[in-house]
Image (spheres, rainbow, N blue to C red):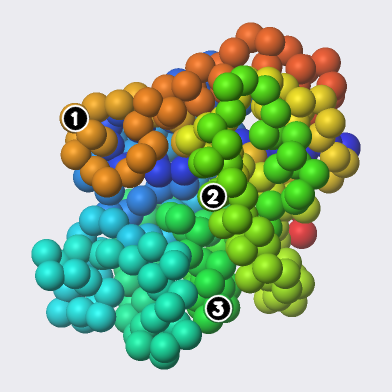
Amino acid sequence: MKNLIVNADDLGWTEGINRGITDAHRRGLVTSTSLLANGRAFQSGLAVNQNHPELGVGVHLNLSDGPPTAPASSVPGLLNKAGHLEGGPESLLLRIAARNLPLDQVELEWEAQILKIKSAGISPTHLDAHKHVHMLPGLFQLALRLARKHGIGAIRISHEESRLRSVLSSGGELNTSVLLKQGIQARGLKLLARDAREMAARAGISSPDYFCGIAQTGVLTRQGVERLLETLPDGTTELMCHPGYVDDDLRQTRTRLQGSRQTELEILTDTSVRKIVATRGIRLINYAFLAQAA
């Protein structure tokens, strides 16, 4: 059986992203999403879940953008001078290596994010993280501990299968510099994640068999998605995506993912893409299926 989870990251960041994820679910392939507890459009993100209960919702653990969810006084080591979370995977990895990232504060912040989402009436299907920072040494173990503590049965393993990365990279006018940079990031995460699936299994936390979408973040093509679907392996694969509409709030953020979000929305709702799913007998699921099957 070929199972596919299509997870749209960043629910709750802006209203335009929320509308895009809703449309990608209603009219397209998106089966799952992950919610930013500190997003400026968090409340309307809750409405997406309420109006579409079949859309799985996970927690998009965040250390990189926006205000903290925990009291600022309890997580000073995670904040910049403006009082916001700030730390991409590279800078956080350097802090971990130098032993100056306060893991107790990371745990406080992440638990506050999980509790905020649960207290809003959502039962999270899984954990993943903004910019994949949950895969960093020490942080993955922390995420597993929080998943077990809060009864969250699945987690994303950002271990991009090389063959799937190659397939998904095909087609269109590819931005080779972006693909090269993100391909290096994907390989780095793969190295960090080499034991992650086994660690999750030992903790009783489920994960997909395959994952892809890192190297193609912001440069996804219809041809690449079609080839992925045509060659999807047996088992469960997660395709990470970032659909959305560009609005003023998004333009004010530092993210480079602007117009690419609407391009991804068009791909994910394309009739030819949806037809391949039907003709190939691909079963669209969300993370809740993994936890139930465990």
Q: Is residue 206 visible?
A: yes
Residue density around tag 3, few if under 14, some if 14–19, many if 20 or more, within 10 Å: some
Residue nearest the viewer, comparing 273 with 32: 273
Q: Quadrant of the C terminus?
A: bottom right
Q: Secondary structure at mark 1?
A: helix
The answer to whether mark 1 and mark 2 are in CB contact below 8 A is no
Q: Earlier in the sequence, mark 3 or mark 2?
A: 3
Q: Secondary structure at mark 3?
A: loop
Task: Give the number of the disc on residue 137.
Answer: 3
Identify residue for label 2: 181
How far is mark 3 from mark 2, CA to CA? 21 Å
Residue at x 24%, y 43% (from the top left corner): 253
Amino acid type assigned to the residue bearing label 1 in the image:
Asp
Q: How many marks?
A: 3
Give coordinates of residue 2: x percent, y percent: 83, 36
Q: Earlier in the sequence, mark 3 or mark 1?
A: 3
How far is mark 3 from mark 1, CA to CA? 36 Å
Task: Give the number of the disc on residue 248.
Answer: 1
Residue density around tag 2, few if under 14, some if 14–19, many if 20 or more, within 10 Å: few
The answer to whether mark 3 and mark 2 are in CB contact below 8 A is no
How far is mark 1 from mark 2, CA to CA? 28 Å
Give coordinates of residue 77: x percent, y percent: 25, 80
Q: Secondary structure at mark 2?
A: helix
Residue nearest the viewer, comparing 248 with 121: 248
Q: Quadrant of residue 173?
A: top right
Question: Viewer-nearest of labels 3 and 2?
Answer: 2
Residue at x 34%, y 66% (from the top left corner): 87
Q: Is residue 212 above or below residue 81?
A: above
Q: Earlier in the sequence, mark 1 or mark 2?
A: 2
Q: Is residue 176 above or below residue 182?
A: above
Amino acid type assigned to the residue bearing label 3 in the image:
Pro
